[in-house]
Amino acid sequence: MESTITELIDCLEQEHRALLAEDVAALESIVARKERLLAALSSQQAGGDRRTTAALGNLLTRARALNQRNAATLTPRMAFNRVRLNALHGARNGDAAVYTASGAFSTR
């Protein structure tokens, strides 16, 4: 379990770098890898002494913090893209549509 969490932490670090670089191709493979690791973690059982359990808890806390950092990195970009899309469809502030849902130009 420890190696899976360590691998997840590495994956989250790679995800952050890809987010900053806006590398969509890298993100696709990284997200797929992250999903596999999370699935593997959910099927594994923690066990061992208190020290092992504490170490796993610390690793999981680190992974959670990295995941939250990545979400915080992504959230403003998603909001910005939403504004762009709304502007293209004329939904912002009740403006006339620039493009229709089918992609055709509209002057209304």
Image (cartoon, rainbow, N blue to C red):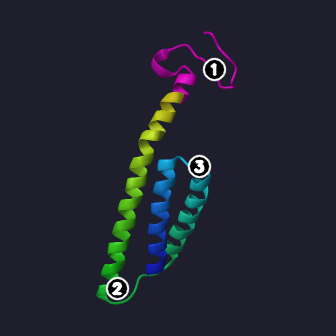
**Vertically, is 13 above or below 4?**
above
Q: Position of residue 47 (x, y in %)?
A: 40, 86
Q: Which residue is disc 2 drawn over? A: 52
- The amino acid type found where label 3 is placed reads Val
Question: Can residue 1 be spotted in the picture?
Answer: no
Mark 3, residues whose alpha carbon is within 10 Å: few (<14), some, or many (≥20)? Answer: few
Q: Which residue is disc 3 drawn over? A: 24
- Relative depth, front residue between 84 and 38: 84
Mark 2, residues whose alpha carbon is within 10 Å: few (<14), some, or many (≥20)? Answer: few
**Closer to the N terminus: mark 1 or mark 3?**
3
Q: Secondary structure at mark 1?
A: loop
Q: Which residues are magenta?
A: 85-108
Badge number at residue 99: 1
Q: Secondary structure at mark 2?
A: helix
- The amino acid type found where label 1 is placed reads Tyr
Residue drawn at x 47%, y 68% as measured from the top left: 10
